[in-house]
Image (cartoon, grey):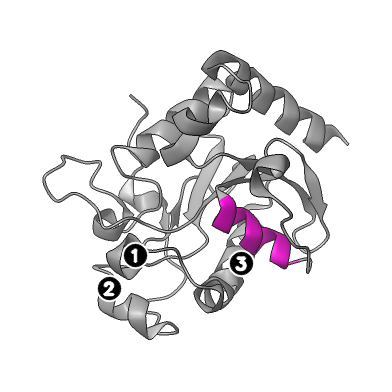
Amino acid sequence: MPPFPDADSRNALAADCRRCPELVESRTCLSWGNGPLDADVVVVGEAPAEGDPGADQWRGGNLTGMAYTSRASGRKIRSLLSDAGFGHEDCYYTNAVKCHPPGNRDPTGEELANCRPYLVAEVEAVTPQAVVTTGKHATETVFALDSDELDGFLDSVLEPRGSDALGVPVVPLLHPSYQEVWLSRLEYSYEGYVEAIGATVERATDE
């Protein structure tokens, strides 16, 4: 079980945000990035899920106000990266969109664009060695900072790409919710995937 982030690590960049009316109506609270501001890796998810009020600590970002704090995806991605050598003190977790989309739908292009300035501010504050994106939408929004398009998400997994906008390499990973579905199709065991993550991020930061 990965450690639950301290509420003091919640990096709230604004007291409120009303850029996306549908998200304002849908969210319970803004789900901000969390983790050390000197982390080696910034981990970008897609958007907070609705959350589970019956859970203990791991209720999800829409209820905790902190990205990647669900008992499913949150614990899974934190455990995965810890197994790959990037533990609790090495990672800052955030989302491409800070609010829960209605019906747990995908964030729209406009919503991703509205939230991009927050993401840039977070990366500039942390100054990591690498940005790790989890899933299609998180990867698309980070690539868009350099006006790059994503040509097939699965082909991008574990393929580092430099970002002039962020000044660090970007390493796409599978979204934790779909990890088991796609690992075998990418011909990875869990252990092989963990090893590849560690080696890829380390290689990307050395280049």
Q: On the image, numbered disc 2 is attached to which residue?
A: 26
Foreground mark, 1 or 3, reads: 1
Return the disc, 3 or 2, that comes first in the chain's sequence. Answer: 2
Name the side, left or right, on which 26 lies relative to 197. Answer: left
Q: On the image, numbered disc 1 is attached to which residue?
A: 100
Return the disc, 1 or 3, that comes first in the chain's sequence. Answer: 1
Kindly identify the amino acid type of the residue bearing the numbered disc 3: Ala
What residue lies at 32% left-to-right and 37% top-to-bottom? 72
Question: Looking at the image, which is closer to me, 98 or 134?
Answer: 134
Q: Position of residue 76 (x, y in %)?
A: 40, 32
Residue 121's disc is 3
Q: Position of residue 164 (x, y in %)?
A: 83, 60
Q: Residues within 10 Å of mark 3 (few under 14, many from 20)?
A: few
Asked if marks 1 and 2 touch (Cβ < 8 Å), the reply is: yes
Q: Which residues fall within the magenta stretch?
A: 136-145
In 3D space, how far apart are the residues under numbered discs 1 and 2 (Cα atoms)?
A: 6 Å
Circle 2 — which element?
Answer: helix
Return the disc, 1 or 2, that comes first in the chain's sequence. Answer: 2
Circle 1 — which element?
Answer: loop
In 3D space, how far apart are the residues under numbered discs 1 and 3 (Cα atoms)?
A: 20 Å
Kindly identify the amino acid type of the residue bearing the numbered disc 2: Ser
